Image (cartoon, grey):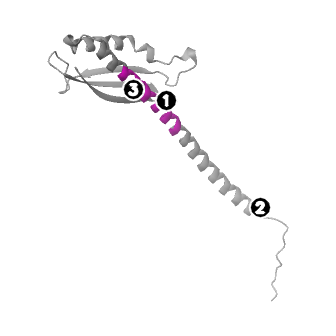
Amino acid sequence: MKTDRKWDARGLTLMEVTFALAIFAVVTAITAQALVTFYVAIDIQEQRIEAIRVCKDVAGAVRDQRGLLDPLEWPDNLVAWVENKNEEGWPEYQRLQDQGEEDLPGQAITVECTNRAGGAPTAGDTVLEVRVFCTWLDRSGRPLEAEIVTYLASE
């Protein structure tokens, strides 16, 4: 069978090359965007893990302090200690930038103590709800927050 035109292997036409480059550019752009999004998600997750570790350490310090205070003054003495530490900013749990260890830029730690009803603790409360918050800024400057909650009994 004869054809009017023989197929020769001299190369690709300009249209074929342009079409291939366009497809390659689209695939590359989609892949690059996916990689950037993936990196940002991993970075935020690592920061969140660090923030939760900080919250757990602070909650542990509050729990340890409960054992050091006079049980007859429960919960006033613990609440006063927490309020004092809130004013100081929990410096022993901050990772300072000048030490080259700042994982959570703009980090702030606060602790709230409430009774079971969610109100201010009073002398008759035997259980306190302790909420530890850690706030920081991600690489884009957006505020993020991690929170843990624990309950402490007077004994």
Q: Secondary structure at mark 2?
A: helix
Residue 71 lies in quadrant: top left
Q: Which of the pair 7/47 is nearer the observer?
A: 47
Q: What segment carries the magenta color?
A: 41-60
Indicate the amino acid at tag 2: Leu
Mark 3 vs mark 2: in front = 3
Q: Residues within 10 Å of mark 1 (few under 14, many from 20)?
A: some
Q: Secondary structure at mark 1?
A: loop
Residue at mark 3 to residue at mark 2: CA–CA distance: 63 Å
The percent position of residue 150, horizontal first and vertical second, equals 30, 28
Indicate the amino acid at tag 3: Lys
Task: Kindly identify which numbered label has been placed on residue 14.
Answer: 2
In the image, is residue 7 above or below residue 38?
below
Indicate the amino acid at tag 1: Asp
Mark 2 vs mark 1: in front = 1
Please report the residue visible at 57 percent of the width from the left and 16 percent of the height from the top. Answer: 99
Residue indicated by mark 1: 138
For marks 2 and 1, the one nearer the N-term is 2
Please report the residue visible at 35 percent of the width from the left and 23 percent of the height from the top. Answer: 59
Please report the residue visible at 39 percent of the width from the left and 26 percent of the height from the top. Answer: 56
